[in-house]
Image: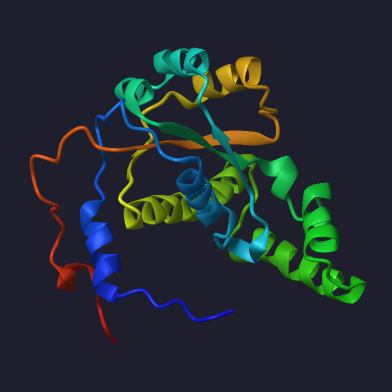
Amino acid sequence: MSTPNIAKEDILNAFNFRHATKEFDATKTISDDDMKFILEAAHLSPSSFGFEPWHFIVVQDKKLRELLKPVAWGAPLKLDTASHFILGLSMKAPMVKHDSEYIMHMMKDVKQLPAEVIELYSKFYREFQERDFDLDTDKKLFDWSAKQTYIALGNMMTAAALTGIDSCPIEGFHQEKAEALLKEKFGVDTDKYGLSFMTAFGYRKADPEFGKTRRDFDDIVTWK
């Protein structure tokens, strides 16, 4: 595979272009090819131990979008105007615990590791959960999964910005009520998956009023 040859200036321009778009141009639709590209960025994203503890629901049905509004106070305008709207799901404890069927499936069927490597990998993963990160509760395990899912979110937004597509990450929702809705109307097994974030994609209706603000570079980076 050839080494990517993307100009640094183009990448930084994409980061400067990206902003949390509050309202999209509802007359503009992202092409199927571009949306597949954005989702492929999630598909190819890294995750701890490479276990991919995520699932993404692309909500295009207008009736389902309407159902999300009462449980997502930060989303109504985006639900009305975004070309595509994604729910980022993260796996809960039964899926990602070191001795789960899913973890064994990932090692045996997806990664196709030899038996002796699976044994060693399982040992490392168990020690990681029980000793290194102290993932001893269901909430801690879900939060760990959510951290991995956010890597995919960042990559999707960056991929979108590189192609001139806007996005907005959304945490403005009531998690318990939203998951109850996902179970009832979206067919999500909420014993296995929880909602980490929502994300809207499309084309901005207007440019942001203010430029990007950040702390000084030296305030966030220390060299030793």
Give percent across and percent down for residue 214: 16, 57
- Left or right: residue 79 versus residue 218 is right
Q: Vertical placement of 160 versus 12: above or below?
A: above
Q: Give the residue drawn at x 64%, y 35%.
A: 193
Q: Quadrant of the N terminus?
A: bottom right
Q: Give the residue drawn at x 70%, y 30%.
A: 191
Q: Is residue 119 visible?
A: yes
Give percent across and percent down for residue 85: 45, 32
- Left or right: residue 169 versus residue 15 is right
Asked which quadrant contains residue 173, the reply is top left
Q: Vertical placement of 120 versus 202: above or below?
A: below
Extreme right residue here? 115
Give percent across and percent down for residue 155: 44, 56
Q: Give the residue drawn at x 48%, y 44%.
A: 35
**Is the image coloured rainbow, by chain, by secondary structure, or in one colour?**
rainbow
Asked which quadrant contains residue 139, the reply is top right
Q: Is residue 74 visible?
A: no
Give percent across and percent down for residue 159: 41, 55
- Left or right: residue 94 versus residue 198 is right
Extreme left residue here? 210
Q: Vertical placement of 144 versus 179: above or below?
A: below
Task: Report the number of discs.
Answer: 0
Nearest the viewer among 94 and 86 is: 86
Q: Quadrant of the C terminus?
A: bottom left
Nearest the viewer among 115 and 154 is: 154
Q: Give the residue drawn at x 77%, y 70%.
A: 121
